[in-house]
Image (cartoon, rainbow, N blue to C red):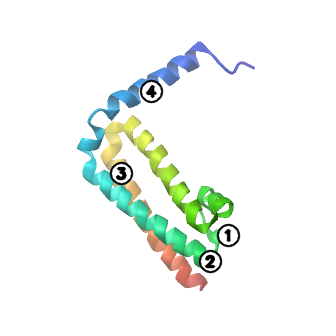
Amino acid sequence: MELYSEQNKQDVLKAFTRIRTNYQGFYEENRGLIFLLIAAAVVDCLSTIYFMHEVGPSKELNPMIKYLGYSLGPLYGPILGKYLQISVGMIAVIYFRSLAKHILVITACLYSWAACANFIAFMIVI
């Protein structure tokens, strides 16, 4: 089985080149939406921490956050998980820069909804 080919190397280099090209001026152009995304992510993270402290990681729906909650605890697990989501997500958004505004708004709405869901689930469970 061949793990490496010239075509794979060229495809990866093209992806890195696209990210580097799209990165130019990205933050200046989308500063407000990035702030909105980070604010929603912080609220979601705080609500997840609260939820995990009260109920435990077993009721968490996101498998990555659940695993990190078990591995690192109900404080550091959600923090690291949200950091990884934002980091990898921003790379994807930069790659698909033409859709960045839509992706950032939708993701901020989903994070806001997730924060509400954490509080609603807490009220139902307790």
Mark 1 closeness class: few <14, some 14–19, many ≥20 residues within 10 Å? few
Mark 3 closeness class: few <14, some 14–19, many ≥20 residues within 10 Å? many
Image point (33%, 32%), residue name: 22
Q: Are marks 2 and 1 in contact (CB under 8 Å)?
A: yes
Number of numbered discs: 4
Image point (37%, 57%), residue name: 38
Mark 2 closeness class: few <14, some 14–19, many ≥20 residues within 10 Å? some
Kindly identify which numbered label has been placed on residue 58.
Answer: 1
- Gap between marks 2 and 4 measured at Cα: 42 Å
Residue on which disc 3 sits: 104
Mark 4 closeness class: few <14, some 14–19, many ≥20 residues within 10 Å? few
Quarter of the image for residue 95 reads top left
Q: Amino acid at mark 2?
A: Val
Q: Amino acid at mark 1?
A: Ser
Q: Nearer the viewer, mark 1 or mark 3?
A: 1
In the drawing, does residue 101 fall left or right of residue 92? Answer: left
Residue on which disc 4 sits: 16
Q: Secondary structure at mark 4?
A: helix
89 and 42: which one is in front? 42
Compare marks 3 and 2 and give the one earlier in the sequence.
2
Q: Amino acid at mark 4?
A: Phe
Residue on which disc 2 sits: 55
In which quadrant will I find the C terminus?
bottom right
- Gap between marks 1 and 3 measured at Cα: 29 Å
Kindly identify which numbered label has been placed on residue 21.
Answer: none
